Image: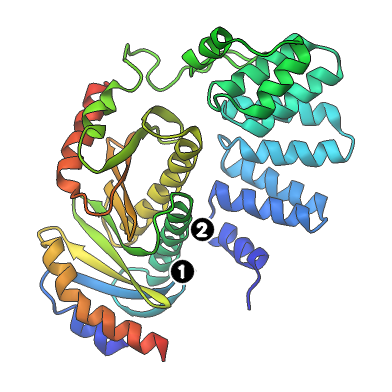
Amino acid sequence: MESELERLRKKVENFPSASAYNRLAELVRLGGDNPGAEQVCRRCIKEFPRNGQAYVILAEIELANGRKDEAIKNLLTAVERDNRSYAAHRMLADHYIEIARPPQALQHLRQILTFKINDPAVLKKIEQITGKPPTASVIRQVTGGSNAVVPGRPAEPTPLANKIIPAADGLAGLCAEAGVRGALIADEKGRVVSSKRLSPEQEDILAALAGEIAKAAEQSLTAVGQERLSMWTIVAEQGQVLSFKREQSFSVVILAEPGVRPAMLEIRARQALIDLGTG
Amino acid sequence: MQEILNQLNRVRGVGGSLLVSSDGLPMASALREGIDEAQLAASIGSVIEHSLSLATHMKLGAQKHLHVASDQGSLLLMSAGNGYLVVVVDQQANLTLMQLETKPFLERIAQRLSL
């Protein structure tokens, strides 16, 4: 039977995706082949330069090999590419603690709290550095700005940086529909622009996998001579996920109860995109 | 299996059909000329892989079907035991009706695959 490693190798050759490269790099690394894993990461970076995870894996390999300077450089690139990379922020925080630069460490730890509110490990670390638990106002302050600047890096404008929008109001009408468990709006790179009634973990998984499904779905449609994915749905026994796309940029992804009919949700989803200024 | 797909293609609104394994390998095909079945099967395999992962993480249970749509038509993916039946759906087709009409074909395919 074909091993997972072989399957992934074939996949990155024939149908490459950032997630396939990342999984392959992790598996090669677990097999003890660090140079091989590094090569996979570098190929991933070349083909998918916006993917942050490859930089994190590369940094882990470099740290294990004592190449600390290169690792830190890659971790900074990782948070620049993906400001919600938990691993990269944690590793950078540890690095700054180690070199006795607590303000920089705190900046990275607080950045984590913007997308992983009340993460026990991060709160504990902040307490260790400051000698006191983070106050509610500190947590509110960091969580209030989901597009906070990455420490040591210029602010990256978000897709909607020039629009004045209330964070999740565009989804309020959609989430008021019966049977909707939660919804989010993501950009084409899988970054969450707005979200309602979803936990941070659900947001991350939903946005990332919805992005991968959309890419593969578009390839499938192209193969049968159709263009422009407009929607996809997964209907399962205990729920469904629906995604509606507009103008090849933003998608609304909805987590709903099994019996909900997509027609009404589509109207609400398209309205949410218009409300958000992306329509 | 080929005969089942040929019969399925006679259903109104069906523009072709393909049977793929869950890892994206074509098992049988009745597609229009010019469609690269290997390319379609590979991308469908990726859709299935990521959707299964999403269903697991979101605790959605077993998948019933997937639907991928564009302005020119859509693709309907239905679990058929050890494989997936992919139906190319014309733009004007009624999806609910098509799901009902494809059900007997799906059951026959699932039965054959379980042998």
Q: Nearer the viewer, residue B63 or B22?
A: B63
Classify residue A43 as left or right of residue B22.
right
Where residue A98 sits: x, y (%)?
A: 85, 20
Is B14 above or below relative to B104?
above
Q: Nearer the viewer, mark 1 or mark 2?
A: 1
Which residue is found at the position 62% from the left and 45% from the top? A44
Quarter occupied by the C terminus of chain A = top left
Crowding at mark 2 (Cα within 10 Å: few <14, some 14-19, many 20+): some
Which residue is found at the position 15% from the left and 68% from the top? B98
Which residue is found at the position 39% from the left and 55% from the top? B60
Crowding at mark 1 (Cα within 10 Å: few <14, some 14-19, many 20+): many
* Residue that badge 1 annotates: B24
Quarter occupied by the N terminus of chain A = bottom right
Which residue is found at the position 45% from the left and 52% from the top? B54
Classify residue A237 as left or right of residue A271.
right
Q: Nearer the viewer, residue A73 or A31?
A: A31
Q: Which mark is residue A200?
A: none
* Residue that badge 2 annotates: A15
How far apart, in angstroms, are the residues tagged by discs 1 and 2? 11 Å
Classify residue A128 as left or right of residue B96.
right
